[in-house]
Image (spheres, rainbow, N blue to C red):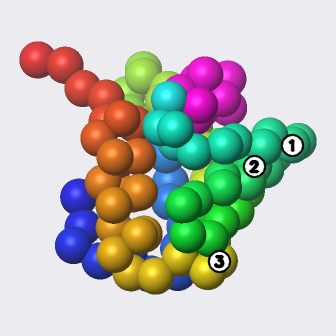
């Protein structure tokens, strides 16, 4: 997790679009989520978050193929503390792993 999230940034997510759409409602918490084709709007307590995504070529490691999704985050009207609060929850929810 970061200590600062700029108003706009992009991420390379290790998931398919189907997985992203399954996880996204939980990742935005109590915020309203408006879904569209390859995009979404999240109504924040202060401002909005505009998301846009597109599938990318899978990451290949040996015989393993990992799906990738390129996601654009663009906050509008959300100050730095609001972005930090939202993204901390979002990142923790989206975190996947095992061990």
Distance of mark 2 from mark 3, alpha carbons? Answer: 13 Å
Residue 45's x, y, as percent?
54, 61
Distance of mark 1 from mark 3, alpha carbons? Answer: 18 Å
Q: What segment is highlighted magenta in the picture?
A: 14-25
Nearest to the eye among marks 1 and 3: give it: 3
Question: Can residue 16 be seen from the camera position used here?
Answer: no
Question: Can residue 19 be seen from the camera position used here?
Answer: yes
The quarter of the picture where the C terminus appears is top left
Mark linked to residue 85: none
Name which quarter of the figure residue 5 lies in: bottom left
In-front residue for pair 6/63? 6
Name which quarter of the figure residue 62 lies in: top left
Figure disc tally: 3
Q: Secondary structure at mark 2?
A: strand
Residue that label 3 marks = 76
**Residue 19 vertical position relative to residue 20 in the rendered view, above or below:** above
**Residue 45 vertical position relative to residue 92 in the rendered view, above or below:** below
Residue that label 1 marks = 36
Q: Secondary structure at mark 1?
A: strand
In-front residue for pair 94/99? 94
Residue drawn where x is 39% and y is 36% of the image: 94
Distance of mark 2 from mark 1, alpha carbons? Answer: 6 Å
**Residue 42 vertical position relative to residue 67 in the rendered view, above or below:** below
Would you say the magenta stretch is mainly helix, strand or loop? helix
Residue that label 2 marks = 40
Horizontal relation, residue 11 to residue 69: left or right:
left
The quarter of the picture where the N terminus appears is bottom left
Q: Residue furthest right?
A: 37
Horizontal relation, residue 30 to residue 92: left or right:
right
Q: Are marks 2 and 1 in contact (CB under 8 Å)?
A: yes
Q: Residues within 10 Å of mark 1 (few under 14, many from 20)?
A: few
């Amino acid at each position: 997790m970061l200590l600062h999230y700029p108003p706009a940034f992009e991420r390379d997510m290790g998931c398919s679009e189907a997985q992203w759409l399954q996880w996204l409602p939980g990742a935005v918490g109590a915020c309203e989520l408006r879904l569209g084709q390859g995009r979404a709007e999240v109504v924040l307590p202060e401002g909005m978050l505009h998301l846009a995504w597109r599938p990318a070529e899978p990451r290949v490691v040996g015989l393993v193929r990992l799906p990738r999704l390129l996601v654009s985050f663009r906050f509008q009207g959300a100050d730095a503390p609001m972005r930090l609060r939202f993204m901390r929850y979002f990142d923790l929810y989206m975190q996947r792993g095992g061990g």
